[in-house]
Image (cartoon, coloured by chain):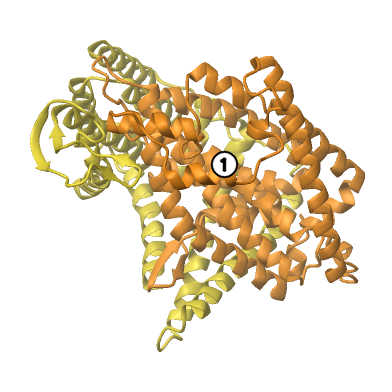
């Protein structure tokens, strides 16, 4: 229960931290959200196309430089750069073995006594292979680049502007409207869920049986679901009272200036260079 | 189950986006027609709910906890199309603002958790719950079964996406470019953890929330009632019959695809001759058929249509075998329909007199 309360608090804090860093001065913060979404999502797509570790390494350095130019707090960057690649490293570790990636042996780990592990056949010696290291290294670099670029997008753009910026990526107006509303009410629901947990936590002397705890969690979810429906009705009536007719309208953001065009030109040149390296 | 960026290659994530684009278009047209203006706040708030519900810790035996996805629950309350949009929106926001799931993998994640899960789970729920009254045990049992099956279907589709990567994308030296684990590893690993652990978390969460709604707010479980009002029984049966007919006509794909891909029999479904060949290949010798297996094959049950082929057609051409396949499919479907009708009749007798209150709850979605 404490963990869930902590989780809700962390997410609420993260939205606030994102808003604060989006308002701070910096390279990416000064750009229009549409240009930024187009440029950074474009770079993420390019990163998924690159094959050579050198190109991916360069893309990693580039994303770090963008982070520094946008003056993001180092602690926040480090948290993402450390936790996500560590998690991915744990997943990718078995791929370094010849069982998954055959290739020249680098280090012999184990001579299995049996040649089968369940339905899987084992080689006479389980080794770490050079090919395996290439596969794992490339995978981690790619994940690192993508995660960093996604963080840059989220941490340097106010959520409402980011969602409106999705129009530049061809997302239909009604989806942008829905995402905007969802983002606005997300903090209300997070707060509600946190209160449900805190109310219970403050009345708990010791935990009951698993079944009882499960029933309590289900009641919490169910009551949140009821609030969703009630709030949905209330919001709908409020929208009607303001003259909503079913047409999604959004404020037109300002035109792009020289800064946005030069950012996109720069990103295009870098992407072309990265693709050329491979 | 949130796939991050870099795990899937463009050969997978681009088609997933294309499929989801079509799906979102159909879903929004359907919802516009069905819910009109009310859809906007309800969907947006339903999406926020889907987001928050993924953060509830559900206790499981052994003192640990797990998270539920909640897509089947949302489908039971809002309908599968609305759930599909709500869960998709939640996944998009998670990827964009909180880095949970990749931006390039949004299409794939929405396909697994926003389409496969709510539709499969909702289908199972409807199958079990049928037209039972809101207080019936079949409601929460159906919800739990829907949660379990829906989550496992989504896990399977995720595992297939992972497992296809080493086949689809390799560098010049033949090394995997994205997720390097093939189907033979990705599918058993994902299936095992979801069948044994996470599926039960989802089942408990979905079933218990529906049980709570049955007690506290039965008007929120109106789907069976409103659907019955909208579609006549005849229309449902016609649609089902057309769907089954199409599937039966597609059964020969099971002959053509292995032929085109040069695949052998399904793993573990070998006949005695194939076992001899497999053993010979593994051990390098002559190969043999285990004595018990040989005995069982001789003395065991002789199927009327072995390998779905008509008598005397075991080694006929693919065209003739296709006809046998379709015929076998039709016979199988007819048998299952009869069996289901008999079971349904038995259930209906048990539940008799309990369906009167259903229509009172219609129109809530």
Is residue A220 depicted above or below A233 in this figure? below
Query: Percent from the top left, x then y, of residue A195?
Result: 49, 72
Instruction: Report helix, strand or loop for mark 1.
Output: helix
Residue at 36%, 19% in the rendered image: A264
**Looking at the rendering, which quadrant does residue B99 occupy?**
top left
Whether residue B327 is visible: yes
Is residue A195 depicted above or below B256 in this figure? below
**Looking at the rendering, which quadrant does residue A39 occupy?**
top left
User: What number of labels is visible?
Assistant: 1
Query: Percent from the top left, x then y, of residue B302?
Result: 65, 41
Front one among B168 and B323? B323
Residue situated furthest top in the rendering: A276
Is residue A105 rendered to the left or right of residue B129? left
State which chain is coloured orange. Answer: B
Is residue A97 depicted above or below A8 in this figure? above
Front one among A141 and A195? A141
Front one among B264 and B65? B264
Q: Quadrant of the C terminus of chain B?
A: bottom right
State which chain disc 1 sits on.
B
Is residue B246 rendered to the left or right of residue B49? right
Residue hosting label 1: B298
Query: Percent from the top left, x then y, of residue A79?
Result: 24, 49
Residue at 73%, 63% in the rendered image: B220
Crowding at mark 1 (Cα within 10 Å: few <14, some 14-19, many 20+)? few
Name the tint of chain A in the rendering. yellow
Query: Percent from the top left, x then y, of residue B183?
Result: 41, 35
Residue at 36%, 40% in the rendered image: B185
């Amino acid at each position: 229960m404490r963990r869930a309360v902590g989780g809700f608090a962390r997410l609420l804090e993260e939205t606030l931290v994102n808003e604060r860093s989006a308002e701070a001065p910096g390279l990416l913060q000064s750009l229009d959200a549409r240009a930024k979404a187009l440029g950074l999502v474009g770079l993420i797509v390019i990163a998924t196309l690159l094959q050579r570790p050198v190109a991916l390494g360069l893309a990693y350095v580039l994303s770090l430089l963008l982070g520094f130019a946008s003056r993001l707090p180092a602690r926040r960057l480090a948290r993402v750069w450390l936790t996500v690649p560590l998690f991915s490293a744990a997943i990718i570790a078995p791929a370094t073995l010849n069982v998954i990636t055959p290739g020249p042996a680098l280090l012999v780990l184990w001579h299995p006594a049996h040649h089968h592990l369940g339905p899987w056949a084992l080689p006479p010696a389980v080794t770490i292979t050079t090919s395996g290291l290439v596969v794992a290294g490339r995978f981690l670099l790619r994940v690192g680049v993508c995660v960093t670029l996604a963080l840059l997008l989220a941490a340097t753009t106010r959520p409402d502007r980011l969602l409106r910026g999705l129009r530049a990526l061809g997302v239909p107006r009604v989806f942008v409207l829905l995402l905007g509303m969802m983002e606005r009410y997300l903090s209300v629901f997070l707060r509600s869920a946190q209160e449900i947990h805190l109310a219970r936590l403050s009345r708990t002397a010791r935990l009951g049986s698993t079944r009882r705890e499960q029933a309590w969690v289900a009641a919490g979810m169910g009551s949140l679901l009821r609030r969703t429906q009630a709030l949905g009705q209330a919001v709908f009536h409020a929208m009607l009272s303001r003259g909503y007719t079913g047409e999604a309208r959004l404020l037109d953001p300002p035109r792009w200036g020289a800064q946005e065009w030069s950012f996109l030109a720069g990103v295009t040149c870098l992407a072309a260079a990265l693709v050329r390296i491979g | 189950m949130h796939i991050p960026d870099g795990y899937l290659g463009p050969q997978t994530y681009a088609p997933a986006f294309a499929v989801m684009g079509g799906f979102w278009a159909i879903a929004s047209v359907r919802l516009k027609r069905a819910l009109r203006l009310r859809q906007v706040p309800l969907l947006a708030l339903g999406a926020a709910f889907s987001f928050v519900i993924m953060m509830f810790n559900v206790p499981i035996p052994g003192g640990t906890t797990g998270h539920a996805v909640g897509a089947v629950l949302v489908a039971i309350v809002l309908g599968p199309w609305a759930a599909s949009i709500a869960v998709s929106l939640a996944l998009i926001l998670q990827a964009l603002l909180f880095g949970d799931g990749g931006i390039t993998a949004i299409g794939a994640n929405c396909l697994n958790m926003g389409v496969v899960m709510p539709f499969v789970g909702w289908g199972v729920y409807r199958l079990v719950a049928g037209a039972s009254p809101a207080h019936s045990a079949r409601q929460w049992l159906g919800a739990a079964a829907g949660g379990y099956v829906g989550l496992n279907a989504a896990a399977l589709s995720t595992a297939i996406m992972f497992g296809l990567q080493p086949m689809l994308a390799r560098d010049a030296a033949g090394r995997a470019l994205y997720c390097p684990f093939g189907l033979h590893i990705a599918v058993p690993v994902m299936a095992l953890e979801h069948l044994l652990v996470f599926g039960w978390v989802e089942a408990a969460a979905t079933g218990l929330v529906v049980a709570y709604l049955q007690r506290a707010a039965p008007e929120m479980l109106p789907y069976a009632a409103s659907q019955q009002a909208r579609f006549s029984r005849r229309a449902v049966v016609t649609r089902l019959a057309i769907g089954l007919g199409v599937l039966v006509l597609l059964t020969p794909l099971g002959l053509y695809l292995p032929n085109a891909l040069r695949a052998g029999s399904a793993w573990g479904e070998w006949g005695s001759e194939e076992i001899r060949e497999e053993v010979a290949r593994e051990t390098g010798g002559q190969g043999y058929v285990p004595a018990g297996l040989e005995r069982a094959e001789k003395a065991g049950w002789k199927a009327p249509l072995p390998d779905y082929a008509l008598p005397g057609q075991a080694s006929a051409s693919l065209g003739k075998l296709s006809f046998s396949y379709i015929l076998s499919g039709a016979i199988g479907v007819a048998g299952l329909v009869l069996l289901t009708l008999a079971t349904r009749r038995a259930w209906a007798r048990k539940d008799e007199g309990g369906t009167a209150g259903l229509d009172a709850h219609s129109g809530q979605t």
